[in-house]
């Protein structure tokens, strides 16, 4: 007789109709992220998981930490990868840096600045903001004046604002923050692996990034680091970090020599990130920055040939993410849809204030190659001629 699992089997849900095996379309991802992963990263990921306390895994964790320090140009002992996307690492910086009542100054010049404001408030910060129009950057003077005026415990700013394509210069800001006894928190999500990021030289105290943009890895594991000054504030806290999962005081015991279990690490993503960072180290940071700059310059000149203009002035333009102005009378979404449908190319649309006004084109990591620029420009030219 068959075993009965429920007193009333007739109430169980029946399985959905059988599905075909998974078929992932081949896309060229030239939007704001994710970008295509390097095939070597996919191969590394595509192996059996091992235990998160396996000696082989612990060794991998050390390797990832060292590679992250190189990638970020920092000697911070507290440097590791958060199990989650860039937003989790973003939240980790605020959760660990902010105690309720701390004043946090956020320099907002795009969508991700607003996300920092939202997150900081949720951790009980008294948030103050300064603002620039979408497409511009702050000057050092503006930031230093705001430090004088507001005396914040933390200044949070996005290095590479993916919503606008602006690179925020950071030279000198860390020294100004240190002089005001303020921690400098920087979003390097769309800069790491494509644009110079020199955390120690710039005296950055907290930083985070993601895996799926400039590092050409799959999404889901995210670089995170705290300077000794930021760790000292963490150690002085009167209250525990409000987010258990992201608490660096607990996680440093897993990533450090004690190896205290916290949560099950995403081991396959660690394989992937290790390979992505190994690729970066093989290429070398300087060569990688050069490649991104050259590929972007090639793209920008091709855009000009098509009669298209960039939203951001060249000196502040990110090589990893370009905002291209949508010509008058052109339906931005229709063009994006056609690029996907006819050419398998993904590009991003405008966010927030720039909705409908720009396309966001990413040339990040593995995808920063002239041949992809050629493919995109040819497709975009054809689609725009049809639309005219
Ligand atoms: C993509 C992005 C994030 C969020 O990262 P996710 O991996 O999507 O969670 C945060 N900040 C900036 C500047 C980004 O571009």
Image (cartoon, rainbow, N blue to C red):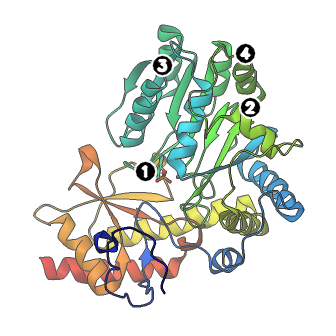
Q: In this view, does 264 lie to the left or right of 385?
A: right
Note whether ligand 1 is within 8 Å of mark 1.
Answer: yes
* Mark 2 to mark 4 CA distance (whole Å): 14 Å
Is ligand 1 closer than 8 angstroms to the Cβ of mark 4? Answer: no
Crowd band around label 2 with a 10 angstrom C-alpha radius: few (<14), some (14–19), many (20+): many
Q: Dot 1 corresponds to which residue?
A: 162
| Callout 1–callout 4 Cβ contact below 8 Å | no
Q: Give coordinates of residue 96: x percent, y percent.
A: 62, 29
Compared across the picture, whether 172 is left or right of 383 comes to right
CA distance for labels 3 and 4 = 17 Å
| Residue found at the far front of this picture | 1
Q: Return the residue found at the far bottom.
A: 20
Q: How far apart are marks 1 and 4 (CA)?
A: 34 Å
Location of residue 252 with respect to 289 vertically, above or below: above
Looking at the rendered structure, the secondary structure element under dot 2 is loop
| Earlier sequence position, callout 3 versus callout 2 | 3
- The relative height of residue 90 versus residue 378 in the rendered view (above or below) is above
Q: Give the labeled residue for mark 3.
A: 125
Quadrant where the C terminus lies? Answer: bottom left
Q: Earlier in the sequence, mark 2 or mark 4?
A: 2
Marks 3 and 1 close (CB-CB < 8 Å)? no
Check the image and report above or below for 150 versus 285.
above
Given residues 260 and 212, the one toward you in this image is: 260
């Amino acid at each position: 007789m068959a075993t009965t699992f429920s007193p009333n089997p007739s109430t169980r849900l029946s399985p959905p109709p059988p599905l075909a095996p998974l078929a992932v379309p081949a896309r060229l991802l030239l939007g704001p992220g994710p970008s295509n992963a390097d095939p070597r990263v996919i191969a590394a990921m595509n192996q059996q998981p091992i235990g998160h306390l396996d000696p082989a895994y612990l060794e991998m964790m050390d390797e990832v930490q060292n590679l992250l320090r190189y990638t970020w140009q920092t000697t911070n002992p507290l440097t590791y990868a958060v199990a989650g996307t860039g937003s989790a690492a973003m939240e980790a910086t605020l959760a660990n840096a902010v105690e309720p009542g701390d004043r946090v100054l956020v320099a907002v010049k795009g969508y991700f600045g607003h996300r920092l404001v939202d997150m900081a408030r949720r951790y009980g910060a008294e948030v103050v903001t300064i603002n620039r129009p979408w497409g511009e950057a702050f000057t050092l003077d503006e930031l230093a004046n705001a430090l004088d005026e507001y005396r914040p415990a933390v200044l949070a700013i996005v290095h590479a604002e993916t919503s606008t394509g602006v690179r925020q210069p950071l030279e000198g800001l860390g020294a100004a923050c240190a002089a005001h006894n303020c921690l400098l928190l920087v979003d390097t999500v769309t800069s790491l692996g494509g644009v110079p990021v020199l955390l120690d030289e710039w005296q950055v105290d907290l930083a985070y990034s993601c895996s799926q943009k400039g590092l050409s890895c799959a999404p889901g594991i995210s670089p995170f680091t705290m300077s000794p000054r930021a760790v000292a504030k963490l150690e002085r806290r009167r209250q525990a970090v409000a987010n258990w999962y992201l608490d660096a005081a607990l996680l440093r015991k897993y990533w450090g020599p004690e190896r205290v279990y916290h949560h099950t690490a995403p081991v396959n993503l660690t394989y992937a990130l290790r390979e992505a960072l190994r690729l970066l180290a093989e290429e070398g940071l300087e060569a990688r920055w050069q490649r991104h700059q050259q590929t972007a310059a090639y793209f920008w000149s091709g855009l000009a040939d098509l009669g298209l203009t960039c939203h951001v002035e060249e000196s502040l333009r990110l090589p990893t993410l370009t905002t291209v102005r949508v010509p008058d009378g052109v339906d931005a979404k229709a063009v994006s849809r056609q690029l996907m449908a006819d050419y398998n190319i993904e590009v991003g649309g405008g966010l927030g204030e720039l909705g409908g006004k720009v396309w966001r084109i990413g040339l990040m990591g593995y995808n920063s190659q002239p041949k992809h620029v050629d493919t995109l420009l040819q497709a975009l030219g054809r689609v725009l001629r049809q639309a005219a």
